[in-house]
Amino acid sequence: MPDTHFDTRALPLDLHDDDVPIFEARFAPRPSLSARGATWLTVALGAAAAVLGSALVAFGAWIALPFVVADVGFALGLLLAHRTRRPRDEHVRVDRGGLQVTRYDHRGRPLSREALPLYGLRLLREEDEEFGLLGLSARRHGTTIPIGRDLPPAERAVLAQAMTRAMAGAGCAPWVSAAPRRCSPSGAMPRPGG
């Protein structure tokens, strides 16, 4: 499971307090390779390099040995860079001032901060019968902000439901529009707008 936390505050809220969040969620995508998997991959690369290097020396092709060492060193360097890099985070906050979506890079620095007022806010859900909720975004007067784009469809659906429920409980329910989105027969996702 990704590091996902949905926080819905006690309602009703003071209508004059813009700093109290109605809904707050912060999440990061799950890493593609666990620490155990990285260890096994490192051991496998080292063993493969040792076997290949030994074979090259045994056949008298020792001149190729530096290339094998360089390739394995490069692969291990990429693996180390992948393991030390933190995934990007997304923070969604809804308060009386509006909806704010802040995205952070792998170092924790804000990449983007987008906001929309609550009045006239529409939540757009792109759903597929087979795969679930493929996309969630907030829209108001032509401005669209994607929400939870790194989450899997099931967790994106939980996020949408929790966010809608919290906003409705605070008396500022968004309009919810569901747009069916079909996948092609090959299983590839269609490009937006096409």
Image (cartoon, grey):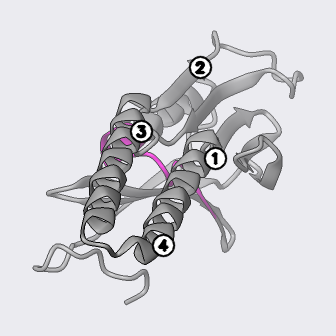
Mark identifier at residue 88: 1
Residue extending furthest bottom? Answer: 194
Q: Residues within 10 Å of mark 3 (few under 14, many from 20)?
A: some
Mark identifier at residue 38: 3
Residue extending furthest top? Answer: 10
Q: Residues within 10 Å of mark 2 (few under 14, many from 20)?
A: some
**Position in image of residue 1 (x %, y %):** 38, 29
Q: Magenta residues, as a range?
A: 145-157
Find the distance from the CA under tag 1 to the CA under tag 4. 34 Å
Name the residue: 41% across, 39% down: 38
Find the distance from the CA under tag 1 to the CA under tag 2. 20 Å
Counting residues from the start of the chain, the first of labels 1 and 4 encountered is 4
Q: Residues within 10 Å of mark 4 (few under 14, many from 20)?
A: few
Name the residue that disc number 2 marks. Answer: 7
**Position in image of residue 81 (x %, y %):** 62, 50
Secondary structure beneath dot 1 equals loop
Q: Nearer the viewer, residue 76 or 96?
A: 76
Q: Nearer the viewer, mark 1 or mark 2?
A: 1
Mark identifier at residue 5: none
**Position in image of residue 133 (x %, y %):** 32, 52
Establish if 49 lies above or below 106: below
Q: Amino acid at mark 2?
A: Asp
Q: Are marks 2 and 3 in contact (CB under 8 Å)?
A: no
Counting residues from the start of the chain, the first of labels 4 and 3 encountered is 3
Q: Amino acid at mark 4?
A: Phe
Secondary structure beneath dot 3 equals helix
